Image (cartoon, grey):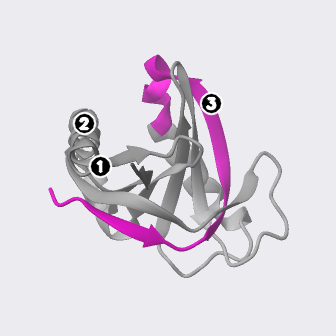
């Protein structure tokens, strides 16, 4: 697993939001199904075949979004949200493996950050990016997605 620091440009997104506790995370995969069913409602989508999942974690709960990238946020469909993620520095890697292994991937990222003098910027959104090209892998239980954790150097 290769980990590196990258600067990610500003992203505009429109999609659905969910808030819950860590024990409720089994609900997250269904959010992707709902978003895929509602994609046609999102105006000004970019040509990028991805779903972007920004999230904000707190000590006891977190907020998770499943969104589509858009050129402009003009109209937001009912029951959805639209927002801009500012340009930021992130620690980046790609998770490849089973869903049960995702937590381990995050642990490795946090360990790398500590080793190289970075701390997570808890004021900013973390991002997971799910590419259409890997959709067949998801159907058989394999997950391949990019992880971007916002960071500051200390």
Residue for point 72% across, 58% down: 83
Residue for point 29% across, 49% down: 117
Q: Are marks 2 and 3 in contact (CB under 8 Å)?
A: no
Viewer-nearest of labels 3 and 1? 1
Front in this rendered view, residue 151 or 78: 151
Left or right of 75, for residue 18: left
Residue 35 to residue 131: above or below: above
Residue 2 % position (x, y): 17, 61
Confirm whether the magenta stretch covers residue 16.
yes
How many residues crowd around disc 1 within 10 Å: few (fewer than 14), some, or many (20 or more)? few
Q: How far is the residue under mark 2 from the one under mark 3?
A: 22 Å
Q: Which residue is mark 1?
A: 117
Q: Which residue is mark 3?
A: 19
Residue for point 34% across, 49% down: 118
Residue 81 % position (x, y): 75, 51
The quadrant in which residue 58 appears is: top right
Name, please, the residue furthest toward the front: 154
Name, please, the residue furthest toward the bottom: 47
């Amino acid at each position: 697993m290769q980990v590196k620091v990258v600067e990610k440009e500003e992203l505009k997104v429109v999609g659905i939001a969910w808030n819950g506790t860590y024990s409720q995370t089994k609900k997250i995969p269904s959010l992707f199904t709902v978003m895929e069913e509602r994609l046609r409602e999102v105006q000004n989508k970019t040509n990028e075949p991805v779903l972007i999942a920004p999230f904000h974690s707190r000590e006891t709960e977190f907020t998770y979004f499943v969104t589509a990238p858009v050129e402009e946020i003009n109209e937001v469909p009912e029951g959805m949200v639209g927002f801009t993620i500012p340009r930021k520095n992130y620690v980046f890697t790609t998770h490849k493996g089973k869903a049960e292994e995702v937590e381990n991937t995050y642990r490795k990222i946090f360990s790398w950050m500590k080793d190289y003098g970075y701390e997570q910027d808890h004021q900013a959104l973390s991002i997971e990016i799910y590419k259409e090209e890997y959709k067949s892998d998801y159907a058989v239980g394999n997950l391949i997605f990019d992880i971007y954790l916002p960071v500051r150097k200390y």
